[in-house]
Image (cartoon, rainbow, N blue to C red):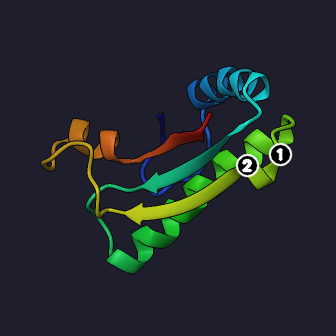
Amino acid sequence: RVFFGYDSSDLDSDALELLQDQVAWLKQNSSVSVTIEGHCDERGTREYNLALGERRGNSVKEFLTSLGVDPGRLTVISYGKERPAAEGSTSEALSENRRAVLVVSGD
């Protein structure tokens, strides 16, 4: 999982480092495909958060493809605020919900 700042789809240095490790794994396992799920915290409208989740997923996809992962192996889906990882409105819960999750399928 990579995390995002409030109202942002920018990848920070921690996210870039994690994704670089995942690129290496994806290159070694070329038969798998990945769904990149974009998620948001509870703030904002449903429509806004679906669009923000899409931008977050696309940020991850663009970075992975820039390092050589075939874009045909990557699908982006946004869940907006519909699938929180943490319940509640604390700053910790909100930050945990602003994320992109890579779900691997295939061999």
Q: Secondary structure at mark 2?
A: helix
Residue at the (43%, 75%) spot, across then down: 48
Q: Residues within 10 Å of mark 2 (few under 14, many from 20)?
A: some
**In this view, 7 is above or below 100:** below
- 10 sits to left or right of 87: right
In the rendered image, residue 29, in percent from the top left (x then y), is placed at 72, 27
The amino acid beneath tag 1 is Asp
The residue pinned by badge 1 equals: 70
**In this view, 90 is above or below 6:** above
For this rendering, which residue is in front, 58 or 92? 58
The residue pinned by badge 2 equals: 73
Q: Residues within 10 Å of mark 1 (few under 14, many from 20)?
A: some
Q: Are marks 1 and 2 in contact (CB under 8 Å)?
A: yes
Could you tell me how far apart the alpha carbons at marks 1 and 2 are, in whole angstroms?
A: 6 Å
Q: Secondary structure at mark 1?
A: loop
- 48 sits to left or right of 45: right
For this rendering, which residue is in front, 70 or 65? 70
Residue at the (77%, 33%) spot, across then down: 30
- Which quarter of the figure is the C terminus placed in? top right
